[in-house]
Image: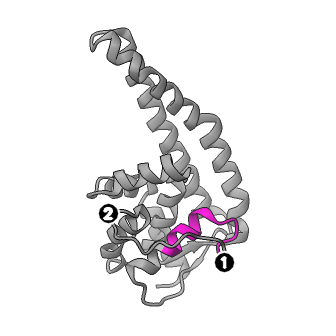
Amino acid sequence: MNNSTRLAALQQASLWSFALRFYALPDVETAFLRLQDEEGVDVCEVLFHSWLFIHGLEANPQALAIERRERARWQRDITAVLRQLRQALKHEALTAGADSGVTELRNTIKKAELLAERENLQRWQAWGQWHQQATRLLPDKARSTQMLAEWLKLSATCPHFDTPCSSENITLPAIQNPWVTIASRLDPLIRAR
């Protein structure tokens, strides 16, 4: 499959739809929440790289650096603010009771947070589809789950993932390592591309 065919496939399969299906797989939500809460990883960016991967593409590191800053700004200024509000209201909602207005407010903020995440994913998708140098063909080589986990981590966390980046050893069992968990769920999708 050539690059233009792969880009056409991206237009047919939205990143949001992929994210909803992928997030629902066993252990994926837990892995993403660990990465977000313990390592400060942008889950939307990991989903973006995963989505490109199943289409045989990867982000071009030079172009990615600029878009990553804009997506990080969105996450910091919009999504994180909503998340902090929702989390701050969690205790209030529990102590006020299920019938309180606090619970309704928290649920409304939770919906707004999800909409902010969807908007961010849609912006990642638009950038990947329409920016001239956003993507490139993924080298076609056999990848173990461990190699895929390392590639995914470097793609989502290193400023220029085509150059060496410090990375802790990720050879832990999947249950202990969220990167391996995510890669192991992507692994069956590889055969589908």
Q: Would you say the magenta stretch is mainly helix, strand or loop?
A: helix
Which quarter of the picture shows residue 182? bottom left
Residue 151 within the magenta-colored segment of the rendering: yes
Where does the magenta region start and end?
A: 150-162
Q: Which mark is residue 175?
A: 2
Give the class, few, some or many, for how many residues have Cα within 10 Å of label 2's Cα (few <14, many ≥20): few
Among numbered discs 2 and 1, the one appearing first in the sequence: 1
Residue closer to the observer: 160 or 139: 160
- What amino acid is labelled 1 in the image? Asp
Q: Mark 1 sits on what residue?
A: 162
| Above or below, comparing residue 135 to residue 74 in the picture | below
Query: Considering the numbered disc 1 on the image, is that residue within a helix, a strand or a loop?
Result: loop
Identified at 46% across, 66% down, the residue is 50
Residue 158 lies, in percent from the top left, at 65, 66
Which of the numbered marks, if any, corresponds to residue 130?
Answer: none
Q: Is residue 185 magenta?
A: no
